[in-house]
């Protein structure tokens, strides 16, 4: 099995789970035992400053918490974009390129010069061994390459159609699929 860590899962119109309707998930881990990701396009109205005050200066606009998924909604996962991705930084775990997770127990001042921005996710999306692969076979997800800025777009609500449109061809046409049409 080839790891899909760092790739995007883009919900297809066939996906029936309301937790993932028109979502874009960045896989931060994919191993034989399962997968873990965060939903990139479900911003809340809760400012990062209200929850993690020390980290709020590093949060990218919109500087709010995001719903990372239905698993452990009280847990926080922080994605960061490094300014210099080749330089190792304590507290940063690389996912792909300049994007990775950050240990929120580290003093944000120690990372300020190295980080170009963060996003904080409440909860995450998780799959057991073989579960994600089965959902992909059932045409619930498109597996696509991520761009470094996908996790930090200024308008996260536009991410689902934006990622689909940049694929071109028939996949770009899916970006215009009406949200209220059910597939059988």
Image (cartoon, grey):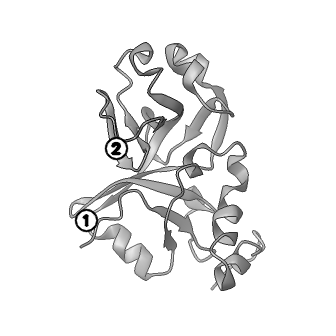
Question: Could you say which is closer to the camera, residue 76 or residue 2?
Answer: 2
User: Which quadrant would the N terminus be assigned to in this image?
Assistant: bottom left
Q: Residue at x 44, y 44 (%)?
A: 99
Residue 102 vs residue 70: left or right? left
Task: Count the marks.
Answer: 2
The numbered dot on residue 92 is: none
Number of other residues with Cα within 10 Å of mark 1, as a class: few under 14, some 14 to 19, many 20 or more:
few
In terms of secondary structure, where does tag 2 sit? strand
Residue 14, image x and y in percent?
Answer: 59, 77
Per the image, the residue denoted by label 2 is 94
Question: Could you say which is closer to the camera, residue 80 or residue 46?
Answer: 80
Q: Residue at x 55, y 47 (%)?
A: 151
Name the image quarter holding residue 50: top right
For marks 1 and 2, the one nearer the N-term is: 2
Residue 134, image x and y in percent?
Answer: 36, 76
Q: Is residue 152 above or below residue 30?
A: above
Residue 148, image x and y in percent?
Answer: 52, 51
Per the image, the residue denoted by label 1 is 129
Query: Which tag is nearer the camera, tag 1 or tag 2?
Result: 2
Question: Could you say which is closer to the camera, residue 43 or residue 54?
Answer: 54
In terms of secondary structure, where does tag 1 sit? loop
How far apart in space, not on screen, are marks 1 and 2 (Cα)?
22 Å
């Amino acid at each position: 099995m080839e790891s899909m860590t760092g790739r995007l899962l883009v919900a297809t119109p066939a996906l029936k789970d309301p937790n993932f309707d028109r979502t874009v998930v960045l896989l931060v881990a994919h191993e034989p035992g399962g997968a873990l990701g965060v939903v990139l396009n479900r911003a809340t109205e809760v400012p990062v400053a209200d929850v993690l005050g020390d980290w709020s200066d590093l949060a990218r606009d919109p500087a709010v918490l995001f719903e990372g998924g239905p698993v452990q909604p009280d847990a926080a996962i922080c994605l960061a974009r490094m300014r210099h991705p080749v330089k190792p930084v304590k507290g940063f775990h690389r996912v792909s390129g300049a994007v990775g997770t950050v240990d929120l127990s580290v003093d944000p001042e120690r990372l300020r010069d190295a980080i170009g921005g963060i996003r904080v996710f409440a909860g995450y999306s998780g799959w057991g061994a073989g579960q994600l692969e089965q959902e992909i076979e059932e045409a619930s997800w498109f597996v696509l390459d991520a761009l470094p800025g996908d996790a930090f777009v200024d308008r996260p609500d536009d991410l689902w159609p934006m990622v689909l449109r940049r694929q071109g061809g028939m996949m770009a046409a899916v970006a215009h699929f009406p949200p209220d049409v059910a597939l059988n």
